[in-house]
Amino acid sequence: MGCSARACALNLGHLKAQSKLSVFFTMILVFTYLFYCLNGFCDSLPRPVYDHHQGNHLQNKLQDGHGGPYNASSLVRGRAPDTGTQANNISIANSFGTKKFPQAIIIGVKKGGTRALLEFLRIHPDVRAVGAEPHFFDRFYDRGLEWYRSLMPRTLEGQITMEKTPSYFITKEAPLIVVVRDPVTRAVSDYTQTLTKSPGLPSFQNLAFRNSTTGLIDTSWSAVRIGIYAKHLENWLRYFPMSGFLFVSGERLVTDPAAEMGRVQDFLGLKRVVTDKHFYFNQTKGFPCLKKPEGSSRPRCLGKSKGRPHPQIPTDVLLRLREFYRPFNLKFYQMTGQDFGWG
Ligand SMILES: Nc1ncnc2c1ncn2[C@@H]1O[C@H](COP(=O)(O)OS(=O)(=O)O)[C@@H](OP(=O)(O)O)[C@H]1O
């Protein structure tokens, strides 16, 4: 389609004015963005720590042998989104300090009480932790150390950076605080969690026994396998000295959180700031809760998925499982020099 010379000139002029305007607005946007980023505000944008699709992909790669062991000494250096902090901490936390690799990692065990321990530690002013589980050493090793560091909250001098990913304990790739809990209760807790996601799941006993007549336990079921603590610990001790570990009792974390937190703070070389005055027992929840969690002045208990009621499992099934774990538990007590009293 054609146009008269005058109409075309007008159109051209109009277009020129339009493109000048859009260049102008784009520049404003770019400058505003740069200004915000230079002031450190970009970091406060929430970013998912765990991308499920990518996770599975990388996990497969790791299983193919692409995720070799990492160098523990390189973990203590450092500088990144603050996934776990509350609103009133964000501007301060994101403008000051640097993102460092974690100096301490809670590596397990799944359903042991790892969330409770991390949330209790986060009220300590010298502890900063990433809220979500990074899964770096078991799923996202390919993303590199800088990616891992970028997930960490900023810390000031003297503050400890921490993370928790309970699956590390049962993988060969990573480390050093382990919350352990009676393997039988832990297995039921694990089963309860899976049941909430897949309500059609076979019964606990169907999954736990390879042969219900002989009472042969199915150690390929992860809910059972995770509880063989002595075996997993043996793997760890091939690379790390026992002195590098702290074993926290999941049971005592519930019955006497302040005492257990005392041990944890000592192990981390922290002043004993988190004490019994930080906890209260919530009758409805049936668990200790925090009077003032990190970044909030209101009391808070852990979420609904922590401290859920367990389904009733037949007593003979639990007894058989207990019998199965006994030698492994004794071995674990011997290795750690601690009697956890699980029988
Ligand atoms: N204070 C407090 N409040 C609530 N729950 C508490 C607390 N302390 C320890 N626990 C126990 O923590 C169990 C969940 O463990 P984890 O946080 O390690 O689970 S997970 O692996 O991260 O899914 C969870 O297991 P279940 O009771 O089976 O739900 C709790 O028993």
Image: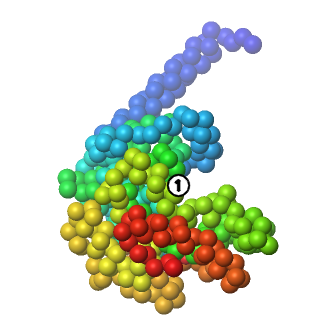
Image position of 313 with respect to 43: above or below:
below
Left or right: 105 as drawn, with respect to 204: left
- Toward which corner of the image does residue 39 lie, by quadrant? top left
**Amino acid type at image mark 1:** Ile
In the image, 22 versus 42, the foreground residue is: 42
Taking the spot 37% from the left edge, 79% from the top edge, the residue there is 257
In the image, 57 versus 50, the foreground residue is: 57
Image position of 165 with respect to 255: above or below:
above
Image position of 96 with respect to 276: above or below:
above
User: Is the N terminus in the top left, top right, bottom left or bottom right quadrant?
Assistant: top right
- Toward which corner of the image does residue 319 lie, by quadrant? bottom right
Q: Could you tell me how many numbered marks the image carries?
A: 1
Taking the spot 37% from the left edge, 82% from the top edge, the residue there is 256
Q: Circle 1 sits on which residue? A: 170
Q: Position of residue 84 (x, y in %)?
A: 42, 59
Q: Position of residue 280 (x, y in %)?
A: 38, 86
